[in-house]
Image: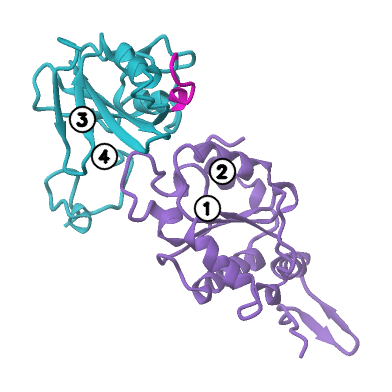
Amino acid sequence: MANIAEMPEGYGGEGFFATSLAKAVGIARANSIWPLPFATSCCGIEFMATMGANYDLSRFGMERLSFSPRQADLLMVMGTIAKKMAPILKQVYTQMAEPKWVIAVGACASSGGIFDTYSVLQGIDKVIPVDVYVPGCPPRPEQIIDGVMKIQELVKNEPLRRRYSPEYQHLLEKYQIA
Amino acid sequence: MPGVIRASNIALDGMLNLQTSREAIIGVLQLLRDDEMMRFNFLTTLCGIHHPDLGGQELGVVYHLHNWLDNVRIRVKISFPKDDPHVPTATVLWPAANWMERQEYDFYGIVFTGHPDLRRILNVDDLDVFPMRKEYRLEDGTRTDKDDRFFGRDGHVGQSFD
């Protein structure tokens, strides 16, 4: 059965339907997210299961993983990020085109996890802004899907101009991302 | 080799340990490598060690050698004060010592004199501590949500969030 996106709020009648452009674009974006998997450890294995036939992330319009940041919409950071990896992660993030979202999958990406040590970044939000955190060590595929659906909600409901807002600019400045 | 080998013993794992000085270490390693009887042709590894309680001899380097022809292994140890952490490089004997010595510089701040390229190798370049030395905390200073009780430290170091 075809999986059809729900109708947005709007005004409809015989043979026509009117809604705001933002809602239409939001639906289009939310159902065609191209994720960039940045998988460094066991959470990445769970992600592979999530992409596999049983859980099948493609159902959410994510058939195509983007292994170039330039075409990606969603940065999925899955696994421990060593401090030496931090500038690379930040570079990948800055190479992505707006609009872009970030999901931190698992305890390590969210907070450093069990690696309470000098060499491990204590959460990727120390270097890039994060939209959704998925708890777990590692999280089950269901949890990753739940996080992705949270991202879809964000994408769907985000005002189109948010990326130009002073709040968003301020957020990026805080991370020293131009 | 009178005066060069300061001590020797057989370790619990059956390997012969030699204790020498950093002044003699290259000569000792060269003899072990080149002597027709010894034939310790392979530098398995070298590693740093920090004993904060051994006054004046806090830092050390342990060389593991392997004779491939007779399948015999040997350990050679040196120790020296933390305030003067200089050791002649073993890259003159084994080029493989290059990265091993960079690692020991990275983690213990041991300066291998004569090393061709003594930079940090595993840690970030701007790290300003030598993290395996025991005077430095292992935990990361930027952590904000770690409770020490859940890391088996129960308030001895770091912080608790009550």
Q: State which quarter of the image contains the N terminus of chain A.
A: bottom right
| Residue marked by disc 1 | A40
Q: CA distance from mark 1 to mark 4?
A: 22 Å
Q: Nearer the viewer, mark 3 or mark 4?
A: 3
Q: Position of residue A26 (x, y in %)?
A: 71, 66
Query: What secondary structure is found at the residue carrying circle 2?
Result: helix
Q: Is residue A97 visible?
A: no
Q: Tell me the chain of label 3.
A: B
Res B138 label: 4
Task: Give whichever of A172, B157 is nearer the camera.
Answer: B157
Residue under pointer 2: A89
| Mark 2 residue type | Leu
Q: Let me know if residue A144 is in the magenta part.
A: no
Colour given to chain A in the rendered image: purple
Q: Is residue B14 left or right of residue A60?
A: left
Residue B96 belongs to magenta span: yes
User: Same chain for marks 1 and 3?
Assistant: no
**Disc 4: CA contacts within 10 A as few (<14), some (14-19) or many (>=20):** some
User: Disc 1 vs disc 4: Cβ atoms closer than 8 Å?
Assistant: no
**Which amino acid does the dot numbered 4 rest on?**
Leu
Q: Are marks 3 and 4 in contact (CB under 8 Å)?
A: no
Report x, y in % for residue A20: 76, 69
Q: Amino acid at mark 3?
A: Asn
Q: Which is in the foreground here, disc 2 or disc 3?
A: 3
Sequence-earlier tag: 3 or 4: 3
Region in magenta: B92-99
Residue wearing tag 3 = B17
